[in-house]
Image (spheres, rainbow, N blue to C red):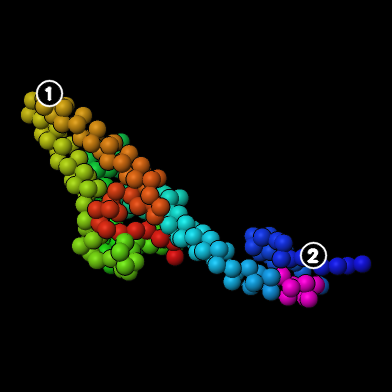
Amino acid sequence: MDSSPNYNNCTLEELLDVRNHIDKEQYPERAKEIDLAISSKMKDPDIKEEIEKQKEISKYSTFWPRFWAATIDGIIFAIILYVECLIFGVEYSTQDKLLQALNGVQLAIYAIFMHGYFGQTIGKMIMDVKVLNHDTETEITVKQALRRESVNLALNISWVLIILVIAISIELSGTISEGLSYAVLGFGILAMLWGISEFVTMLFNDKRRALHDYIGKTVVVRI
C-alpha cells in the first residue's frame, strides 16, 4: 500500500530537495502535498527569519566572484597592454616593471570609470556582482568610486614614479642610491600590508567588505 509520508516532520531543506527530484507527472497529488507543506513551513516565523538570514549571507558572499572578476579584468588589461605595445612599437614583456606599473594605473582608472558609471567592471558583469552604496544599496557615484580606488591608484602611480627615478639614477650614476633602495623596500612593505589588510577585513565582517569598501562607503553584492 502506497502511503504518503508525514511531510510535517520534514525540514524545509528536505522538502525543497524532494520537490526538486519528484516526478510531478507521475505523482501530481504528492507534489501538491509537498508544495502545501513548504508553504506551511514558510509561514513559520522562525523559518522565515532563517530564510532571510540565509539570503542575506548569500547576497554578500562575494569573495570568489570578486576574485574571478579581478582575474578576468586583469586578463583583459594584459591584452590591452599588449595591443598598446604593438601600436606604439614598444616591446611587450611581463618582466618590464614600468610597463606593468603603467598597466596598473590604467586598470585603476578603468575601475573608477566603470564602478562610477555602471557599478561593475566587465569582470563583475560576467560574475554577476555589483558595487553599491553601503547605506542605501543604491548606485554609487564617481566620487565614491574614486575614493574606493584611491589607494590602489596612488600605489600604482607611486610605483611608476619610483621606477622612473631608479631609471634616471642608473642612467646618471650607474647605481641605485641607498635612499632609493630603502624607498623600494618601504614601498614593497606598504603594498604588501595594504594587500593583507584588504584580505583580512573581508574575512572579519558579515558583508565581506574590503578596506577599500570602507573607504568608499560601498558594499559588493550578488545580483
Is 223 on the left-hand or right-hand side of 160?
Answer: right
Q: Are marks 1 and 2 in contact (CB under 8 Å)?
A: no
Report the amino acid beneath label 2. Answer: Pro
From the image, give the main secondary structure of the stretch colored magenta: helix
- Numbered disc 1: secondary structure: helix
Q: Residue furthest right?
A: 1
Magenta stretch in the rendered image: 27-34
Q: Quadrant of residue 163?
A: top left
Residue under the image location 77 percent in, 69 percent down: 23
Q: Quadrant of residue 161?
A: top left
User: Residue 40: x percent and y percent?
Assistant: 64, 72
Report the amino acid beneath label 1. Answer: Glu
User: Residue 2: x percent and y percent?
Assistant: 88, 67
Q: Nearer the viewer, residue 21 or 32?
A: 32
User: Residue 8: x percent and y percent?
Assistant: 71, 66
- Numbered disc 2: secondary structure: loop
Q: Quadrant of residue 195?
A: top left
In front: label 1 or label 2: 2
Residue under the image location 24 percent in, 48 percent down: 152
State the count of labels: 2
Q: Check disc 2 and report the residue beneath it.
A: 5
> Would residue 99 be seen by someone viewing this image from the given angle?
no
Question: In this picture, is 157 found above or below 140?
Answer: above
Q: Nearer the viewer, residue 101 or 91?
A: 101
Q: Check disc 1 and report the residue beneath it.
A: 178
User: Residue 47: x percent and y percent?
Assistant: 57, 64
Q: Nearer the viewer, residue 87 or 198?
A: 198
Is 126 on the left-hand or right-hand side of 109?
Answer: right
